[in-house]
Amino acid sequence: MLPSICDSIDMKWYFEDFVYGSIDGAVTTFAVVAGASGAVLSPSVVLILGFANLFGDGFSMAIGNYLASKTRKEYIEKERRKEEWEIDNLAEQEKQEIRDIYANKGFKDELLDQIVRIITSRRKVWLDTMMKEELGLIEGKRRPIDTAISTFTGFNIIGLIPLIPFVFFFTSDSGLSSSDVFPYSVIFTVIAFFLVGILKGKIVKRSLFKSGTYTLAVGGIAAIIAYLVGYLLSLVV
């Protein structure tokens, strides 16, 4: 599934959104499981709360990512239109800004004149340079809907893993309580973080073990905090 989605968008951006969603999915689902297990709720209730979190929070994150990406895209488009107007109506001032930018980079004399002349002779290059060098804005090719789907997919695929033990023991009618099943959920959550790290390491061509361990450490800290909050709340509620 990952390669098919990545065929239509930039893999780096897709993977960042996928990791963002997957870590949050595993942590928040684990927090629900931890709190519900600490309150000694039945496995069926844990599953209801867990799946409600998966789809509810997953959709919320996806929408949030979509709106954030769309807002940034619209902001960049607005700034680009502004720069286009300035190039068309304040050409000399914009040329001086190009000169100042490259003068600050250490270029001078004839070389500086040549750089300014080359950049300002092509409108698109001139505009792209102003966007990047003056405003620090780089236009991405990914669509907001792609970032939303990537986040939602990561959230639900990896966020489901802490619930797998509860699904198994519930469907097998083992009679175990949620607190009995919880240790298995801890193990599955550890596996989830490590798998995300391995996948990240494979994509960026880094050590799979180191990448998996690092992601496990970061996600583990977040999961421990989530567990402590859920456990403490279960004592007072």
Image: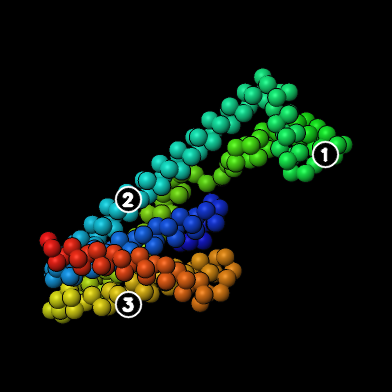
- From the viewer's perspective, is 116 left or right of 54? right
With respect to residue 77, does 194 lie above or below? Answer: below
Percent position (x, y) of residue 191? 38, 75
Sequence-earlier tag: 1 or 3: 1
Amino acid carrying mark 1 in the image: Lys
Distance between the Cα atoms at labels 1 and 3? 61 Å
Say which of 231 and 84 sits in front: 231
Say which of 59 and 99 sits in front: 99
What's the residue at 83%, 34% (across, down)?
Answer: 113
Is residue 99 among the parts visible in the rendering? yes
Give the class, few, some or many, for how many residues have Cα within 10 Å of label 3's Cα (few <14, many ≥20).
Answer: few
- From the viewer's perspective, is 174 left or right of 153? left
Give the class, few, some or many, for how many residues have Cα within 10 Å of label 2's Cα (few <14, many ≥20).
Answer: some
Residue 231 falls in which quadrant of the image?
A: bottom left
Q: What SS does tag 1 mark?
A: loop
User: Of the residues tagged 2 and 3, which is closer to the observer?
Assistant: 3
Sequence-earlier tag: 2 or 3: 2
Asked if the residue under mark 1 is in contact with the one under mark 2, i.e. CB atoms within 8 Å, the reply is no
With respect to residue 69, does 89 lie above or below? Answer: above
Percent position (x, y) of residue 74? 49, 35
User: Of the residues tagged 2 and 1, which is closer to the observer?
Assistant: 1
Give the class, few, some or many, for how many residues have Cα within 10 Å of label 1's Cα (few <14, many ≥20).
Answer: some
User: Of the residues tagged 1 and 3, which is closer to the observer?
Assistant: 1
Say which of 130 and 175 sits in front: 130
Amino acid carrying mark 2 in the image: Phe
What's the residue at 46%, 43% (across, down)?
Answer: 69
Q: Which mark is residue 59?
A: 2
Q: Which quarter of the rendering shows the C terminus? A: bottom left
Q: What SS does tag 3 mark?
A: helix
Q: Which mark is residue 187?
A: 3
